[in-house]
Amino acid sequence: MTDSANAVPRFAIIIPARYASTRYPGKPLVRLTGATGEERSLIRRSWDCAMAVEGSVGVWVATDDARIAQEVESFGGQVVMTSPDCANGTERCAEAVAKLGPIADVIVNLQGDAPLSPARVIPQLVRQLAQDAGAVMATPAVRASRTVYAHLTKDQAEGRVGGTTVVVDGRGRALYFSKRVVPHLPPEAATLESPPVHLHLGLYAYRPAALERYAAEPACALEQLEGLEQLRFLDLGLPIAVVQLDPLAWDAIELNNPGDKPVIEAILKERGIA
């Protein structure tokens, strides 16, 4: 790690991607139309997001699927092949690091379904992890806008699994993550311009030793119930630092369901992203 409190430690970005998604099979290869009318695959747009980050020592897509690997290689991306037995993106990152060796002081997981993630947040995560010696991982959450909150509650009311929310303690560490909207809001809070709900963004910065520990442990009950990999860290008593962001200028919707595709495409066009 670097000695300067203001400097960013050496970090690498890994984008875990699998074809056999339960909710949306083939999701990494879904084509998304940008502002110029050009179609690019979801994995390409996730790669573009990673490449916009300043300071990384390298970017790799970790996958077990030849179709995804071929797509990544078609636009010049780097691929590391991993086992189909990886249960989630964190396990896939852990295996990728085991194969690649000591590539960096911090490993960043940019999930392959989050093309609207703000690239500027990644150095903040890495810096936060360097400053919080007790945390094994750092991840961002953004205060929900009224439209994001409406999107989340609509998904919940209609029985769809949408975005993930997180509640944070007074030290800035995660108490719990859920695919339900937490905390519960009374009506007066739910109608605020920025309701007090934090949407978790699909980014993680890990210490390599924490990845190794994670991969050595079985999935916990809450992780299996919620389908949220980060809950294994909390179940093991390993602290997660949360970088809390003000509402973004755009809605950082992930591609979780087919119905999210037109929403993401509209935001790409609004932001002028090709």
Image: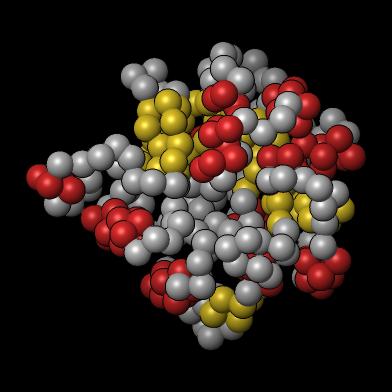
Quarter holding the C terminus is bottom right
Task: Work out whether 13 lies above or below 135.
Answer: below
Q: Which residue appears at 57% of the width and 37% of the height?
A: 223
Locate the N terminus and report the quarter of the image it occupies. Answer: top right
Picture coordinates of residue 56, whole percent (x, y): 69, 42
Query: At 57% from the left edge and 24% from the top edge, which residue is drawn?
Result: 235
Q: Which one is nearer the viewer's eye here, 193 or 163?
A: 163
Which residue is drawn at the image coordinates 78% and 66% (left, top)? Answer: 68
| Residue lying furthest left | 188
Q: Quadrant of residue 42?
A: bottom right
Question: Which residue is more in the foreground, 143 or 226?
Answer: 226
Q: Is residue 200 left or right of residue 221?
A: left
Residue for point 51% across, 43% down: 226
Furthest-bottom residue in view?
37
Please give the count of numbered marks on the rendered protein: 0
Expressed as whole percent of the image width and height from the top left, the position of residue 127 reads: 56, 28
Image-quadrant location for residue 32: bottom right
Instruction: Where is residue 118? Give x, y as percent.
Output: 49, 51
